[in-house]
Image (tube, rainbow, N blue to C red):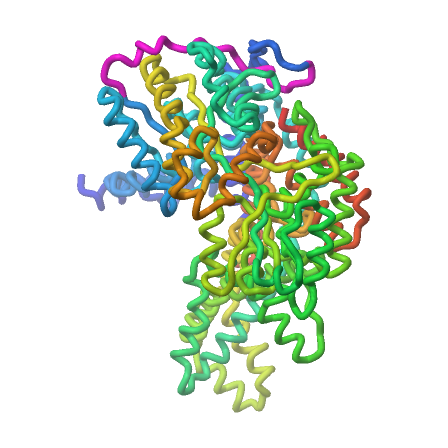
């Protein structure tokens, strides 16, 4: 039996829907597997690597989170059930860091989308400096986070920093940005937007380059102004790209750590301690508790991704 | 969509159930072992430490290879350690020392923990006191009492008193052997000090007077990094700890319990708040004191003596860099030892342990320490090294004075919760200096949090 004959033999017939759509769907999946079992052999190395280095550690992290874990001497670890999770939700540090993460995610996602879309629209208009501008916008994204974080520490220095120098020209005495409970988080958000926006601008530029110009021309013939053209014609066509940008920015923001560690170490107080920073702080001496934080962070990321996948469905986008 | 979500949730449930099953089947559900080395003070947290028996020195008779996990990766540190290793191997042809280098101490700690966890611990490793406490409590390093008792007089007698005391934990047993030690010193702009008609301060009162006197026209007496929750021990934080000790009470007691809101600590915090209020103290991030000193915008920078080459590099030829011991407080001189000690991991064979002990003692001979200190800027851990390094001390007279301070200096807190609780101190310092919180309120909060950190880590 050839592959195609095999596929035909296993293909659903007109009578199968009577068994119910779920069973039919299952049979179709089985049929797909049998069409080309060798395909799975080709995929196997990647699947094994994924299972060993991603899936297994994830399961093991959850396992550890159920223990008062002694990483140095595992035999001395104590099973404590969900006590680490109970403790987590009772501790002020976790609540504060979760709120900080929320603030950071909202600011970088909303700010990132608006800023990158704006820059992409400007760059799309072309001009003599467009190539140089694209390079300038994208360059921060490929710079090392630690190196540029340290550079920003000095840009934000209260006494010698560029930002406060500029503010002093207009008669404003700038704050001690990274040591102020009020300004530390906005400063890290500003840095993060500067660093990350290059990537999302390129994504939006890609989206803009494949839009149909006829729709915009038709709208202009109908007499719409520039804002109406963007809002009613361009923007709806960019929704799939926007959903992708929101999804990827949310995941990156939830897991952001390096800039916080380098610029503020989570301080002052807990004002820039996000869930990732808290996880780092706790995991060495309280491994089980740290693992519980990691599981919660994982769960939040999964939920956010599912919500965004739901909103990216064609039916949702057509609204 | 509902089907897909349901599927994801089902898979997640299966994974969680599997993990729970694994947890239920786990063999390691027993409580912590209570085999104690004995002899500790009643409130010492080291309930899991175990006594060790030193192997006979002759155990290292045949060919043996020992591994040394270290972080001496930068500049002259790497070449100096390699030189000492080659000298040791030449004198002991049967022993090979494999250096396992990490780029910094944070990575070193992680590498050591990972290696122990994977049951592939090195023979020996550099440690801070807090790490050693955690390792000892987990029973993964050897207690060194029996090693020390093999020879008379005890090898400890050759060390500076402060260094010798730093090698034991709160149960009064020895677990560490010194290697690279440093202290905080006062780096300053000698030209600026002379122009202001001042001399290097010898008391903290004088320090405040001088700092206030020079703080004008864009110059600030001193600039510090107050630290934060995960910052580790920054200059500002360590200064606060040293001041508290100089004013009468260290911030940790002998058992490692935090005493952040003692009258001495509050006085120390008030001292810093007054300096800030008078414009003699500024704050910043990423070695701000060194940068301000180098830019001639700061007079003093309190930093580890091991950072001498970095300070000199920042200063260049702009002015003469002065170096003095820290001023003294009402309770006398106080300083905090930095740098690391070395431990022997219990999983090593007897032959490796015997060879490792021989190597560790070699590292602290007068000759080795004279070479090490002259080439790296670290302080010699034995006074016997100083006469052998006159070529260096004649050009750097501060080294002799600084090394002498090792007699009274104490190490960093030898408790597993040291890093986390120090973060609370850093937060308190920031609150006082930046957010106008009173020293008493800030330190009371830090104390409450530090006690919680201590409980959580035990």
Q: Quick one: quadrant of the C terminus of chain A?
A: bottom right
> Where does the magenta region start and end?
B42-64
Whether residue A17 can be seen here: no
The kind of secondary structure the magenta stretch mainly shows is: loop
Q: Is A62 above or below relative to A212?
A: above
Residue in the foreground of this view, choosing between B90 and A44: B90
Percent position of residue A243, x then y: 52, 61
Q: Is A218 above or below relative to A242?
A: below
Q: Residue at x 52, y 26 (%)?
A: B132
- Residue B455 sits in quarter: top right
- Residue B243 sits in quarter: top right
Q: Is B449 above or below relative to B186?
A: above
Q: Quick one: quadrant of the N terminus of chain A?
A: top left
Percent position of residue B233, x then y: 59, 42
Residue in the foreground of this view, choosing between A226 and B443: B443
Q: Residue at x 42, y 17 (%)?
A: B346
| Residue B61 part of the magenta-drawn span | yes
């Amino acid at each position: 039996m050839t592959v195609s004959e095999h596929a035909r033999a296993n293909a659903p017939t007109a009578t199968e829907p009577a068994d119910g759509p779920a069973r039919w769907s299952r049979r179709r999946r089985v049929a797909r597997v049998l069409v080309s079992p060798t395909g799975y052999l080709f995929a196997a190395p990647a699947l094994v690597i994924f299972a060993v280095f991603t899936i297994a550690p994830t399961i093991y992290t959850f396992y550890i989170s159920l223990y008062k874990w002694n990483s140095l001497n595992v035999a001395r670890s104590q099973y404590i059930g969900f006590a680490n999770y109970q403790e987590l939700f009772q501790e002020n540090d976790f609540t504060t860091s979760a709120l900080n993460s929320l603030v950071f995610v909202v600011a970088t996602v909303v700010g990132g989308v608006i800023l990158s879309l704006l820059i992409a629209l400007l760059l799309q208009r072309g001009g003599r400096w467009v190539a140089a501008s694209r390079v300038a916008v994208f360059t921060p994204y490929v710079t090392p986070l630690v190196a540029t974080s340290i550079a920003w520490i000095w840009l934000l220095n209260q006494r010698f920093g560029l930002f406060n120098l500029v503010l002093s020209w207009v008669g404003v005495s700038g704050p001690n940005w990274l040591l102020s409970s009020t300004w530390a988080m906005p400063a890290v958000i500003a840095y993060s937007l500067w660093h990350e926006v290059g990537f999302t601008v390129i994504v939006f530029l890609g989206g803009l380059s494949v839009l149909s110009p006829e729709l915009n021309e038709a709208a202009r013939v109908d007499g719409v102004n520039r804002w109406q053209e963007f809002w009613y014609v361009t923007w709806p066509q960019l929704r799939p790209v926007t959903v992708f940008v929101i999804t990827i920015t949310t995941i990156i923001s939830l897991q952001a750590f390096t800039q916080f560690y380098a610029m503020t170490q989570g301080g002052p107080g807990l004002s820039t301690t996000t869930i990732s920073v808290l996880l780092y702080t706790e995991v060495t001496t309280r491994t089980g508790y740290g693992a519980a934080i990691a599981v919660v962070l994982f769960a939040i990321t999964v939920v956010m991704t599912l919500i965004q996948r739901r909103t990216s469905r064609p039916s949702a986008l057509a609204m | 969509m509902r089907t897909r979500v349901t599927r994801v949730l089902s898979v997640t449930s299966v994974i969680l159930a599997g993990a729970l099953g694994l947890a239920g089947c786990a063999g390691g559900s027993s409580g912590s072992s209570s085999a104690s080395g004995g002899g500790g003070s009643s409130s010492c947290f080291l309930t899991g430490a175990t006594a060790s028996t030193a192997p006979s020195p002759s155990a290292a008779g045949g060919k043996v290879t020992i591994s040394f996990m270290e972080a001496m990766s930068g500049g002259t540190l790497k070449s100096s350690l390699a030189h000492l290793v080659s000298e040791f191997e030449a004198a002991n042809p049967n022993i090979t020392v494999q250096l396992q280098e990490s780029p910094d101490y944070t990575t070193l700690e992680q590498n050591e923990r990972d290696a122990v966890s994977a049951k592939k611990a090195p023979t020996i490793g550099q440690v801070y006191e807090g790490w050693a406490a955690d390792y000892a409590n987990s029973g993964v390093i050897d207690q060194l009492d029996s090693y020390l008792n093999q020879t008379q007089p005890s090898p400890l007698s050759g060390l500076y008193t402060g260094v010798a005391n730093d090698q034991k934990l709160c149960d009064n047993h020895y677990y560490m052997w010194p290697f690279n030690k440093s202290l905080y010193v006062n780096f300053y702009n000698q030209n600026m000090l002379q122009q202001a008609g001042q001399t290097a301060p010898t008391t903290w009162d004088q320090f405040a007077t001088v700092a206030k006197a020079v703080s004008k026209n864009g110059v600030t007496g001193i600039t510090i990094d107050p630290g934060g929750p995960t910052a580790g021990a920054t200059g500002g934080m360590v200064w606060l700890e040293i001041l508290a000790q100089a004013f009468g009470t260290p911030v940790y007691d002998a058992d490692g319990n935090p005493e952040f809101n003692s009258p001495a600590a509050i006085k120390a915090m008030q001292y810093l708040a007054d300096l800030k209020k008078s414009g003699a103290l500024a704050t910043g991030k990423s070695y701000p004191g060194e940068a301000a000193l180098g830019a001639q915008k700061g007079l003093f920078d309190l930093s580890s003596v091991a950072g001498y080459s970095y300070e000199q590099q920042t200063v260049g030829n702009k002015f003469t860099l002065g170096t003095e011991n820290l001023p003294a407080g009402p309770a006398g001189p106080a300083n905090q030892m930095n740098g690391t000690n070395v431990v022997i991991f219990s999983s090593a064979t007897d032959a490796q342990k015997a060879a490792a002990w021989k190597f560790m003692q070699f590292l602290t001979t007068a000759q080795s320490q004279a070479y090490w200190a002259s080439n790296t800027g670290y302080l010699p851990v034995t006074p016997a090294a100083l006469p052998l390094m006159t070529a260096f001390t004649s050009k750097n007279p501060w080294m002799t004075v600084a090394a002498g301070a090792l007699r009274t200096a104490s190490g960093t807190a030898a408790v597993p919760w040291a890093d986390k609780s120090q973060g609370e101190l850093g937060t308190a310092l920031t609150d006082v200096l930046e957010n106008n919180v009173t020293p008493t309120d800030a330190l009371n909060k830090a104390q409450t949090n530090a006690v919680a950190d201590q409980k959580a880590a035990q």
